Amino acid sequence: MLKLSRLTDYAAVVMAQIARHPNKPHAAAELAEAVQLPHPTVSKTLKMLVKADLLVSQRGAQGGYQLARSASSITAADIITAMEGPVAVTTCSQAEGECELASTCGVSDNWQRVSMAIRTLLESVTLAHLAATTPIKLPVQLPIQSISVEAVSA
Amino acid sequence: MLKLSRLTDYAAVVMAQIARHPNKPHAAAELAEAVQLPHPTVSKTLKMLVKADLLVSQRGAQGGYQLARSASSITAADIITAMEGPVAVTTCSQAEGECELASTCGVSDNWQRVSMAIRTLLESVTLAHLAATTPIKLPVQLPIQSISVEAVSA
DNA sequence: TAATTGGGTACCATTTTAGTCCTGTATAAA
DNA sequence: TTTATACAGGACTAAAATGGTACCCAATTA
């Protein structure tokens, strides 16, 4: 599935909600109501987003959460990283040299490249895109430049 | 992390190993030895790949597993789908209309587009690419076409 | 017919994830 | 200054997914 965790999903929804009404702090309770999710869970999500510097918080009455910067400078990759850590398809594409099977593996280099391409893609999608009702237009993939595969199929 | 499951990772490694020595059946035990993973686990992985029609198997003495088709016509997306089901970033981007929060969500459409873009990317990476020692060259991402985000930041 | 090799299933241990709760602290308004 | 509001941090529990193993059956070939 290559799926995002549920909390990451919530984070995106909540961030989008805030992005649609900037310049005003949003209390956790208000956001929970708006997106129809349990308050404690939304609260936990918000705390993680603050820790990752995607939101800023204001305590006390009339306090709440606001975007730390503009919606167009926050990316999907930022949100995913905040909730789940660095975007990496395989464990070995996250931390180099920590896989003792590297010698017999033979695919790690290429998985790293795939990871990087996905990361680039996710960095090109901003919160502004996600929050917009207008569908985003993602780039059509260019075909992979052909490489020598003769050594493989021979 | 957006990580693949460990079994998917194994599947890629095993598939690559077979791809490097086609035209000859590979017994599970032999593959397990080659990639340095426990036999039962490799065996389980192989069975799943057969079920997904990526490998064909031959029982009996001198039997084993071979690619069901050429390495260049098997994609990373195929392998991931075989092990984890359809590539989808969110649950709602997999099956339409099964999320009761859709009305308050507001980002599902755009996640679906992101999912699709990742799927396209993974479909452009073949087993031949993964198995090759030559690094694959993934396309440079084109910048996203600008869309109206005024409605968001206003 | 015996040895080899995959097929299917069920099971268990572990890890990860999700969700909740509690106590503390900062802020603003009355 | 007091009080209500709202975030901060961490501990804890329940549930689910994952990974790994074992067992017995079926097919094939020498």
Image: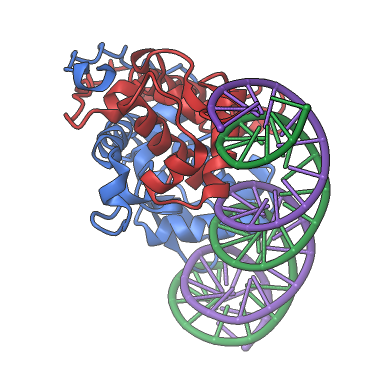
Chain colours: A red, B blue, C purple, D green
In the rendered image, which quarter is residue A57 located in?
top right
Whether residue B11 is visible to the viewer of this picture, yes or no, is no
x and y percentages locating residue B30 in the rendered image:
62, 50
x and y percentages locating residue A59 in the rendered image:
61, 26
x and y percentages locating residue A38 in the rendered image:
50, 53
Name the residue located 23 percent from the left edge and 28 percent from the top edge.
A132
Position of C4 relative to D18 (above/below)? below
In the rendered image, which quarter is residue D3 located in?
top right
Whether residue A33 is visible to the viewer of this picture, yes or no, is yes
Between A142 and A109, the one lying in front of the other is A142
Name the residue located 46 percent from the left edge and 30 percent from the top edge.
B131
Name the residue located 33 percent from the left edge and 26 percent from the top edge.
A21
Q: Quadrant of the C terminus of chain A?
A: top left
Name the residue located 21 percent from the left edge and 20 percent from the top edge.
A139
Q: Is residue B120 left or right of residue C8?
A: left
x and y percentages locating residue A99 in the rendered image:
70, 30
Between B108 and C5, the one lying in front of the other is B108
How many numbered discs, if any? 0
Between A65 and B92, the one lying in front of the other is A65
Position of A58 relative to B104 (above/below)? above
